[in-house]
Image (cartoon, rainbow, N blue to C red):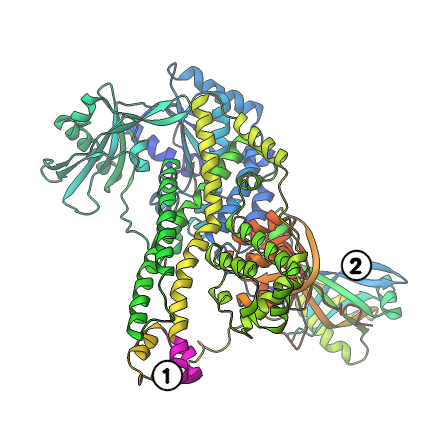
């Protein structure tokens, strides 16, 4: 039997380390690779980035973002068995006490980056997800909404 | 080990290098059994072929397109056919070709070759399935040898193997195929021996025929059979056969020829021969330490062992219990299919005569007791014909599959389903029925009286030509019998006429396949066969394919005639008792109705409201945006979805809408010409929906598991018949993060 969708989504959100973040740079899309951590309720995702990066500047002027998380292995079989989750949402740069939860989750997920997340020049960003779209079996696409479907 | 290796030159290779069959043959040879001169292409050759032709990704994509456990057997056949075509398009390296060529210098002059599969996935389940992979006999030159080696490699991914994919642990990275090539041992007498009778553990069984044992294995030649006592080795019984024919190796393949008078009068084995064969299978049993099923042949008095495998007892599979095993039994040989063809032509005549007799019965004016009698008279033949449908008509569909396979092997087309075009020489019943509907629409258009009758719902006043056409539709084309109950205001008739007059006249007429294209394809196919005998066989195969293709739709139409006859009596019973019982009669089954007809006071005991099993089926979260199926009719369509649950939903179909349904039955195809596209849950390239979509040039995707659950009537959808995709177009939520 095919794996239930929810299992695939959880695997991507909680087993993958890196995702491709798309931000808006004026009228152009701009992509970067980020280490992320997801809340267990799957409603939000955190990542950290140095203060001066272009992605952070982009978010400051336009919070619309999309994060692609996938499990490809750079093999021919990826086309048929890899899955990719696009998380669409709004990004917010955290401040004050809000950063604690983000730092804890990120440090737990990426222990080797603990110092990076603790640095005062590292901005912690929260993406509130408004929609997921999951692609698997090469072309099968399913959309769902955090809180409602999951 | 990337070239041909004679058995004698092997050291001690494992299954992962030469596969299971080669290894067990090698063991037998080393243990002193006389086996034919044998060679092996180790799995490395398969690996090289896959690598050089970049096939791994293609196979991966094909077998993962859809969860194979959700696929019907027909879809597995399609998948296997696509993979097979990728192999057939592949090229063997020059080095391997030279290596293969050496074999002809190593075998005796004028000896044919046999090519047999030897896969690494062979284990207990594989051994119990003769025919999971392919073997070929009678190979006479290098070109044939190359071709058959490729086909044996491809058979690692046969439909049967895909069906047992999980048990075989079949996967692209690890599963491999080695090939055994043998000098064919053309014996005067051949057979099979079971060291232990599967039905009686104290006995052994020996079967023998004249000529090749291929005829015995295929079931085309009946053997003489001996039963021996296992403890004493004495013959207990000899069952003689008619010994009419034997199979021999000829120029164009193996053929059946008549036995001589001397052969007919003498069993293929004498007593000492039987003993010799028995001692061979005892030796094999001793060697493998379990009872064996041995193939053997005798050539110039020398006994050779061709194959030995453990005996597995398999009872006749029941489709309800094990659908996969049952599906595998449906495959038929060419000769067997030809027999079915002759049988079916007779059966159809019998069906028509039988239906005509039953149609003469008057069910409205008869007494209640007579009505029950008529129900019995119609029920028995219905059950009989349903049995025939499963036993004869369903296996006969393999006729077109066999043709497709041979067409692809000989022509090697880019499109593995090109052969379907060649099958469509004659319009089938469904297409002829659609033409009748078109004619009816034209009659109505020109007949003021009928137009008025339809507008006012007074169907008793329909013109003669219209009524005649309705009779033809019901009698010849199995449209629902309700069409003939022309009482005024009849809801069914109202919907039907609204459909026919509103839309059907705008329907496109059948897209005639260009005659030239058909001739060109036919010419290309037949040109591949040399010699009169081969050409005759090719023509026979084409004719078989066409007839089998035609029957695919027509068998249902013939059977529906009996279903309708039966249903008409049930409806009449309901009509008679409705005034007494009321609307609840709709829930009465056949048994209840008979009771109610014979006893006016009968009332069915009210049953508790049936609970649906374990509540609503757990549904996957989310909304499907894009679904994947099998590309079954090329083209792209965008339009409004019309989900069909009951057949009558089809009357609501608007021109250009996309039909979404479980499966298009032949009784539904009348609406197809109106559709902009077709999406079916049921999968396959040779199912009704796909066939008729191709016939009309309508884009079609089949095997979309979630189609009915995910799509609602009125949804805007697009359908990609080239890639097998269905996209449900919804307003995008992207950009909400702003």
Say whether residue A7 is visible.
Answer: no
Residue B510, percent across and down? Answer: 62, 48
Can the viewer see residue B15?
yes
Choose mark 1 or mark 2, whichever is in front: 1
Is residue B701 left or right of B110 when viewed as pictured? right
Is B95 drawn above or below residue A63 in the view shown? above
The location of residue B105, given as percent across then percent down, is 43, 15
Give the residues drawn in magenta, as a range: B574-589
Q: Is residue B329 left or right of residue B728?
A: left
Q: Chain of mark 1?
A: B
Residue wearing tag 1: B607
Q: Which mark is residue A32?
A: 2
Q: Nearer the viewer, residue B581 or B699?
A: B581
Look at the numbered disc 2 and give the secondary structure of its residue: strand
Residue at x 33% of width, y 63% of height:
B379
Estimate the spatial distance between the alpha carbons at disc 1 and disc 2, rounded to whole Å: 65 Å
């Amino acid at each position: 039997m095919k794996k239930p969708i929810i299992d695939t989504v959880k695997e991507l959100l909680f087993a993958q380390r890196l995702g491709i973040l798309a931000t808006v740079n004026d009228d152009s899309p701009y992509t970067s690779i980020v280490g992320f951590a997801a809340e267990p309720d799957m409603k939000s995702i955190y990542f950290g980035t140095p203060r001066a990066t272009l992605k952070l500047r982009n978010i400051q002027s336009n919070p619309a973002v999309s994060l692609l998380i996938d499990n490809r292995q750079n093999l021919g079989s990826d086309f048929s068995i890899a899955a990719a989750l696009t998380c669409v949402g709004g990004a917010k740069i955290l401040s004050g006490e809000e950063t604690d939860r983000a730092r804890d989750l990120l440090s737990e997920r990426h222990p080797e980056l603990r110092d990076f997340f603790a640095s005062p020049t590292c901005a912690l960003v929260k993406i509130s997800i408004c929609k997921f779209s999951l692609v698997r079996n090469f072309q099968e696409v399913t959309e769902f909404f955090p809180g409602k479907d999951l | 080990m990337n070239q041909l290796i004679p058995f004698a030159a092997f050291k001690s290779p494992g299954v992962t290098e030469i596969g299971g069959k080669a290894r067990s043959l090698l063991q037998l040879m080393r243990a002193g059994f006389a086996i034919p001169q044998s060679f092996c292409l180790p799995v490395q050759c398969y690996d090289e072929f896959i690598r050089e032709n970049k096939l791994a990704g293609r196979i991966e994509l094909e077998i993962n397109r859809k969860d194979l456990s959700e696929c019907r057997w027909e879809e597995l056949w399609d998948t296997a056919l696509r993979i097979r075509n990728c192999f057939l398009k592949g090229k063997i390296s020059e080095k391997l070709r030279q290596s293969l060529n050496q074999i002809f210098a190593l075998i005796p002059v004028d000896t044919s070759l046999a090519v047999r599969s030897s896969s690494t996935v062979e284990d207990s389940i594989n051994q119990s399935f003769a025919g999971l992979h392919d073997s070929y006999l009678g190979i006479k030159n290098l070109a044939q040898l190359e071709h058959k080696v490729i086909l044996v490699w491809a058979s690692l991914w046969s439909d049967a193997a895909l069906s047992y994919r999980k048990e075989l642990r079949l996967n692209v990275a690890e599963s491999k195929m080695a090939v055994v090539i043998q000098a064919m041992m053309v014996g005067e007498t051949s057979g099979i021996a079971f060291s232990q009778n599967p039905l009686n553990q104290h006995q052994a069984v020996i079967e023998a025929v004249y000529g090749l044992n291929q005829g015995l294995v295929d079931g085309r030649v009946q053997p003489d059979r001996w039963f021996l006592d296992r403890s004493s080795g004495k013959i207990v019984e000899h069952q003689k056969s008619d010994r009419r024919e034997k199979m021999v190796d000829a120029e164009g393949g193996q053929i059946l020829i008549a036995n001589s008078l001397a052969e007919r009068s003498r069993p293929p084995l004498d007593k000492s021969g039987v003993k010799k064969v028995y001692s061979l299978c005892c030796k094999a049993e001793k060697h493998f330490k379990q009872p064996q099923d041995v193939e053997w042949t005798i050539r110039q008095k020398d006994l050779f062992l061709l194959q030995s495998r453990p005996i597995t007892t398999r009872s006749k599979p029941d489709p309800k219990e094990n659908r996969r095993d049952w599906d595998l039994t449906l495959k038929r040989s060419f000769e067997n299919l030809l027999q079915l063809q002759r049988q079916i032509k007779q059966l159809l005549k019998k069906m028509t005569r039988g239906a005509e007799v039953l149609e003469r019965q008057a069910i409205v004016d008869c007494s209640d007791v007579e009505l029950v009698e008529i129900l019995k008279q119609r029920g028995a033949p219905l059950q009989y014909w349903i049995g025939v449908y499963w036993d004869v008509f369903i296996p006969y569909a393999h006729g077109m599959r066999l043709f497709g396979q041979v067409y692809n092997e000989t022509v090697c087309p880019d499109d593995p389903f090109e052969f379907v075009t060649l099958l469509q020489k004659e319009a089938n019943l469904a297409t002829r029925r659609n033409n009748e509907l078109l004619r009816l629409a034209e009659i109505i258009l020109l007949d003021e009286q009928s137009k008025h009758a339809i507008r006012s719902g007074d169907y008793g006043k329909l013109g003669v030509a219209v009524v005649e056409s309705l009779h033809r539709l019901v009698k010849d084309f199995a449209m629902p019998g309700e069409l003939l109950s022309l009482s005024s205001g009849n809801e069914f008739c109202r919907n039907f006429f609204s459909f026919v007059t509103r839309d059907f006249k705008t329907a496109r007429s059948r897209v005639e396949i260009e005659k030239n294209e058909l001739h060109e394809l036919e010419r290309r196919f037949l040109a591949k066969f040399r010699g009169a005998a081969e050409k005759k066989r090719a023509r026979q195969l084409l004719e078989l394919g066409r007839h089998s293709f035609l029957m695919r739709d027509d068998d249902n139409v013939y059977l529906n005639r009996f279903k309708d006859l039966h249903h008409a009596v049930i409806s009449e019973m309901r009509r008679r008792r409705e005034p007494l019982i009321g609307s609840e009669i709709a829930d009465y089954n056949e048994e209840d109705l008979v009771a109610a007809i014979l006893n006016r006071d009968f009332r069915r005991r009210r049953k508790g409201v049936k609970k649906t099993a374990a509540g609503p089926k757990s549904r996957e979260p989310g909304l499907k945006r894009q679904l994947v199926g099998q590309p079954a009719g090329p083209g792209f369509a965008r339009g409004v979805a019309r989900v069909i649950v009951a057949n009558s939903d089809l009357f609501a179909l608007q021109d250009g809408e996309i039909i979404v349904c479980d499966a298009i039955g032949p009784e539904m195809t009348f609406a197809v010409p109106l559709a902009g596209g077709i999406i079916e849950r049921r999968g396959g390239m040779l199912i009704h929906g796909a066939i008729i979509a191709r016939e009309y040039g309508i884009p079609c995707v089949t095997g979309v598991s979630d189609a009915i659950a995910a799509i609602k009537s009125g949804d805007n959808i697009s359908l990609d018949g080239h890639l097998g995709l269905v996209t449900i177009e919804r307003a995008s939520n992207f950009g909400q993060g702003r």
